[in-house]
Structures are given as structure tokens and as C-alpha cells.
Image (spheres, rainbow, N blue to C red):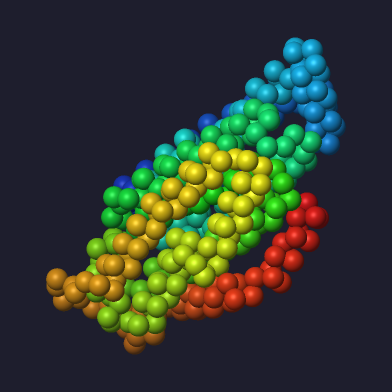
């Protein structure tokens, strides 16, 4: 995990000639180092409290300590393991950009180039969420729902992320900062599957992550494959009237954003539906209520993109270009731009296909959950 982090620090600060790029790299490195230190300290306390380093043995000792605590109301090992678990969760929540450890996300997204921002928004979240799922299944598999300090921390982080992401994105004009807050909200939804601690929750979580990857690739593909007056699109207001100029891009944006917002019958709706079902199954009503409320709020700022692109006439003349235009030929970024447009097309096809034929995907994810 630290090897991955070192590479990300370099990528975030690659734009050394700009103030935003330097700030992004420095802020990510300093805060990331602090989070790594807290996570290492948490691991050391867990190992010290358990007396072993094997994860399966730690799980057995942890569950035994909880049992003794319930009977005798006192166990010194439990306190050490719980304190380490808190620090461990704090470190992981920073790595994934989860509230209240999310402050670096909008600034780093804003300062990094769009290609690097796409990598940070997609690949890093997958890796850290995979670590969270694996460790919590292995270490605390006998403790279900919100019954230990680690699950309580994840519960609070999930609620906080959904609220911070939903309200933080409302007034954003920069597309990158908007995507940063949107990603924070999505992390809150993904954590619902971990907090529920059930097979259904794991399947729903895997489905949500898969759909999130596809939607993120498609949306970044739209941004990377388009230019306004020869320059990269940076703000939402630049999309004013774009829908009338390029029908394919407008339709792709409509499908992807509706899916991200969770509008039926697209794939994003089914992923949220399964996650909420897993939370209701274990009576996590507060988490479900927050998720539904923030989904409604999120629909507003996703629809704002569509409103700007489709229902307004631009106030000024501009030249909108895509990878299919002649001006892109010979450009050094033409390959990236063309691949982005291809990803955008495949994303729309996948979202519609998953909505029409979800059974085979759910069967695959069920096998995946059993393997974990």
C-alpha cells in the first residue's frame, strides 16, 4: 500500500510549474505521510495487544476478547486492539478520501492533470476498498453489524462522507472539485456494504464498485475527449449549450450522469438499491435514511450538468471540439483522447446492458463473495 502511495505522491505533483500542482503534491505527501504513520501505529497496537502477527490468529483473539468483555466487563487486551483499530481505520479512511479525512481530495484533484485525477479517482479507491473488505472479513468476521469500535468508525465515516460529499458538491463550479466531492459521497455508499457485514452487503458493495468504475471511466472520457476553444474543459459553465453541438456526447453525458445519480432503469440505480437493501436487512435505518436523502440531493447537482448542456443557449461564441474533429489530428494527446471517447461509448453500452441483463453479473459477484 505504501509503494502505491509513493507513486501517487509523485503523480499528484507532476505539474511543478503551476501553483496548484505544487500545492497538490505537497499537501498529498504531508497528509499521506501522517496517515501512514497513524496506520502503522494502529497495526503495532493491534499486534501488541494480540501478541501475534497472523491475521487469522488476531481475529480469534479479538473475538475471544469481545466475548470475555461481554461476560466480565473488563479485558485489557480489548482496549489495546480497539485503540489500534481506530488508528488503522483513520489511516485507511484518509487513503480512500473518506470524511472527515477528505480535505486533501478536492485540492489534489484540482491541482493534478485530468489524466492523473482520473487515475486517483478510480484506481486508488479500488485498491484501498479491497484492503478494507479483506481485512475486515478476515480480522473481524465473527463480529457483525455495528458491534465493535472499528465498525462504529466505519459507520460514522460512511454517514459523514455521504453528507459532506452531497452538500460539498452543490456549489462547485470546477469540474475536478465537483468530482472530488462526488467521489467522497460514493465512498460513503461503498462503505455501507462493509458496515452491513453480510453476504448481500458484500455482493452489493462489489456491484457498486464495478458500476462506479465504469461510470467514472465514462465521465472522465467525456472530459478528456472534448475541448472548448482548443482548451480543456474546466468548469461546469463551459458546458453551456454543448448538447446542441454534439448529439453523441450529449447522449453519453445524459446516460452516465443519470446512472451516477441512481435514476432507474440504469445500472447505477440497481447498485444503490442492493446496497440499501443490505443495510435494511440488518436494521441500519439511520444509514439507509442518510443514503436516500443524500441520493436525492445528489440528483440535483448531477442534473445541473444536463441542464447546462441541453437546456441553455450559450451566451458567447465558442468552438467545441471532440476527438472526431480534424483539429485533433496530429495532436500529442490524440491517442488518449480517442481512447477516452471509446471508453465513453463502452460505458454507455455497459450501463444499459447491466440494467437489462443483471442476472449474470449478480451470479458472478456471488461467486466472488464466496471466494472472499
Which residue is depicted at the point 74% across and 51% down?
Answer: 199
- Considering depth in this image, is 97 or 301 the residue closer to the camera? 301
The vertical placement of 94 against 254, above or below, is: above
- Considering depth in this image, is 148 or 239 the residue closer to the camera? 148
Query: Considering the image in quadrants, where does the N terminus appear?
Result: top right
Which residue is depicted at the point 36% across and 45% down?
Answer: 167
Quadrant assignment, res 117? bottom left
- Considering depth in this image, is 184 or 21 the residue closer to the camera? 184
The vertical placement of 320 against 291, above or below, is: below
Which residue is depicted at the point 61% across and 28% down?
Answer: 87
- Considering depth in this image, is 3 or 207 the residue closer to the camera? 207
**Where is residue 183 drawn, in percent x and y?**
47, 52
**Where is residue 128 drawn, in percent x and y?**
62, 47
Q: Is residue 56 left or right of residue 165?
A: right
Quadrant assignment, res 355? bottom right
**Where is residue 163 drawn, in percent x and y?**
43, 42
Query: Quick one: which residue is furthest to the bottom in this view?
Result: 326
The vertical placement of 64 against 294, above or below, is: above
Amino acid at each position: 500500500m505504501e509503494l502505491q502511495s509513493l507513486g501517487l505522491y509523485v503523480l499528484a505533483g507532476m505539474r511543478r510549474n503551476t501553483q496548484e500542482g505544487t500545492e497538490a503534491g505537497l499537501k498529498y505527501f504531508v497528509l499521506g505521510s501522517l496517515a501512514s504513520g497513524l496506520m502503522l501505529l494502529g497495526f503495532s497496537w493491534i499486534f501488541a495487544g494480540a501478541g501475534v502477527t497472523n491475521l487469522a490468529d488476531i481475529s480469534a483473539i479479538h473475538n475471544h476478547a469481545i466475548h470475555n468483555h461481554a461476560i466480565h466487563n473488563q479485558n485489557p487486551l480489548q482496549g489495546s486492539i480497539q485503540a489500534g483499530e481506530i488508528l488503522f481505520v483513520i489511516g485507511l479512511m484518509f487513503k480512500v478520501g473518506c470524511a472527515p479525512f477528505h480535505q486533501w481530495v478536492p485540492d489534489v484533484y484540482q491541482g493534478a492533470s485530468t489524466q492523473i485525477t482520473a487515475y486517483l479517482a478510480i484506481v486508488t479507491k479500488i485498491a484501498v476498498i479491497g484492503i478494507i473488505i479483506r481485512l475486515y472479513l478476515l480480522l473481524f468476521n465473527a463480529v457483525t453489524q455495528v458491534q465493535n469500535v472499528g465498525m462504529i468508525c466505519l459507520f460514522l465515516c460512511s454517514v459523514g462522507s455521504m453528507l459532506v460529499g452531497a452538500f460539498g458538491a452543490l456549489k462547485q463550479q470546477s469540474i475536478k472539485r465537483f468530482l472530488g466531492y462526488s467521489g467522497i459521497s460514493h465512498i460513503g455508499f461503498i462503505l455501507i456494504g462493509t458496515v452491513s457485514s453480510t453476504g448481500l452487503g458484500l455482493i452489493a458493495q462489489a456491484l457498486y464498485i464495478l458500476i462506479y468504475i465504469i461510470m467514472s471511466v465514462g465521465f472522465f472520457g467525456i472530459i478528456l475527449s472534448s475541448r472548448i476553444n482548443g482548451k480543456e474543459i474546466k468548469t461546469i459553465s463551459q458546458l453551456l449549450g454543448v448538447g446542441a453541438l454534439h448529439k453523441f456526447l450529449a447522449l453519453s453525458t445524459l446516460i452516465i450522469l443519470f446512472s451516477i445519480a441512481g435514476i432507474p432503469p440504469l445500472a447505477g440505480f440497481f447498485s444503490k438499491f442492493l446496497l440499501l437493501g443490505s443495510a435494511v436487512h440488518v436494521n441500519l435505518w439511520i444509514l439507509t435514511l442518510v443514503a436516500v436523502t443524500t441520493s436525492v440531493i445528489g440528483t440535483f447537482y448531477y442534473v445541473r450538468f444536463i441542464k447546462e448542456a441541453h437546456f441553455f443557449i450559450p451566451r458567447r461564441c465558442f468552438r467545441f471540439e471532440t476527438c472526431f474533429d480534424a483539429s485533433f489530428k496530429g495532436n500529442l494527446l490524440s491517442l488518449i483522447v480517442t481512447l477516452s471517447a471509446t471508453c465513453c461509448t463502452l460505458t454507455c453500452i455497459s450501463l444499459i446492458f447491466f440494467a437489462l441483463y443483471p442476472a449474470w453479473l449478480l451470479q458472478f459477484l456471488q461467486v466472488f463473495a464466496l471466494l472472499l
